[in-house]
């Protein structure tokens, strides 16, 4: 039994490696080539969750599960909010062969998935990124989006202006592009071509009225039914793309709020991102269209990323 720890995941699962892995996994998912159950989420109180995500990469392919806890308050303690394990089984005998640090896999593959969606849905001339939030996913999203678009500026908003400024300064040093903290959400997104929402907000923080025509949004932070980062108006106005249609219909907070208000039906989900990537359904249809990629995450992203690390082994110098 092999264990791949956080340091090894961070060292080897670069965005250049992970983005194509996740892209391929999303296409396979939407083609029905993978197998998975809708994830089970157990509320633990005070915004804390425990999730179980089982799946298989194919009929005769590696399979396994992710066991993950979500403790949002960990950020203030300098710890990952998502912690857990990805357990891999090989397909020949069904033996468990590897355990992988799930927190780091989740941090990287989630941002890689947003980068895949951004590359497919954002305008080719998109250069200005806004990130709502300043936690771990804000860091990984800034890194990942910079791999698919040549960014000229990044704006940051967070509930603590001091933390937002500190995050902006750190990312500017790392990425070498201007990064500024905004006084409020409206200012942060005012000139943005790409917006990533990666907060723990339970109620909408972003209004559709603030979003420019032609913007692409990755809505990531709200991971279960009930919480919502963006308002109904933005959902209604957008071309709404899901990572998983079934997942969004059951657990996509923003979509379910707009549906409950009688503003949209299930057919408002224009496509899964895997269908767009495969060329089966058109993504962005015009330069003025607002596109939303709703990210809940599915286990085949975790399994594909983890299996690549396991099967390739440690790279030799």
Image: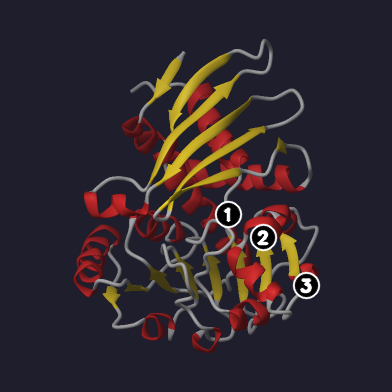
* Marks 1,3: beta carbons within 8 A: no
Task: From this view, report whether residue 162 is shown above or below residue 54.
Answer: below
Dot 2 crowding, Cα within 10 Å, few <14, some 14–19, many 20+: many
Mark 1: secondary structure? loop
Identify the colour scheme used: secondary structure
Considering depth in this image, is 41 or 138 the residue closer to the camera? 41
CB contact under 8 Å: marks 1 and 2: yes
Q: Which image quadrant for residue 54? A: top right
Is residue 98 visible from the viewing direction of this image?
yes
Task: Determine the residue positioned at 67% across, 10% down.
Answer: 93
List the residue tagged with mark 3. 265
| Of the image marks 1 and 3, the number of the one nearer the N terminus | 3
Secondary structure under tag 2 reads strand
Give the residue number, with chain letter if any, for mark 2. 242
Relative horizontal placement of residue 90, taking residue 33 as reference (left or right): left
Determine which of the numbered discs, if any, sits on residue 296 in the image.
Answer: 1
Front of the two marks 1 and 3: 3
**Which circle, 3 or 2, is nearer the viewer?**
3
Q: Is residue 17 above or below residue 1?
A: below
């Amino acid at each position: 039994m092999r264990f791949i720890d956080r340091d090894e995941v961070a060292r080897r699962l670069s965005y250049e490696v992970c983005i194509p892995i996740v892209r391929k996994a999303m296409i396979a998912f939407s083609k029905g080539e993978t197998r998975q159950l809708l994830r089970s989420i157990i509320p633990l109180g005070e915004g804390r969750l425990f999730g179980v995500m089982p799946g298989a990469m194919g009929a005769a392919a590696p399979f396994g599960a992710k066991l993950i806890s979500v403790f949002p308050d960990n950020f203030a303690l300098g710890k990952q909010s998502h912690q857990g394990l990805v357990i891999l089984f090989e397909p020949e005998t069904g033996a468990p062969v590897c355990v992988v640090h799930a927190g780091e896999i989740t941090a990287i593959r989630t941002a890689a998935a947003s980068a895949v969606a951004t590359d497919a849905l954002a305008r080719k001339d998109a250069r200005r990124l806004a990130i709502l939030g300043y936690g771990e996913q804000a860091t990984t999203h800034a890194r990942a989006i910079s791999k698919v678009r040549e960014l000229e500026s990044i704006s940051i908003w967070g509930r603590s202006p001091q933390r937002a400024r500190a995050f902006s300064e750190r990312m500017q040093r790392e990425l070498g592009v201007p990064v500024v903290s905004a006084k409020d959400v409206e200012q942060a997104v005012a000139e943005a071509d790409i917006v990533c929402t990666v907060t723990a907000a339970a109620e909408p923080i972003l209004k559709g009225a603030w979003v420019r025509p032609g913007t692409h949004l990755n809505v990531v932070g709200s991971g279960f039914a009930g919480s919502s980062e963006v308002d109904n108006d933005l959902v209604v106005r957008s071309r709404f793309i899901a990572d998983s249609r079934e997942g969004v219909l059951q657990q996509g907070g923003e979509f379910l709020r707009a549906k409950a208000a009688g503003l949209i039906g299930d057919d408002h989900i224009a496509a899964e991102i895997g269908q767009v990537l495969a060329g089966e359904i058109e993504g962005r249809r015009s330069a003025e269209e607002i596109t939303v990629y709703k990210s809940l995450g599915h286990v085949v992203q975790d399994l594909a990323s983890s299996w690549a690390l396991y099967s390739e082994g440690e790279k030799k110098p």
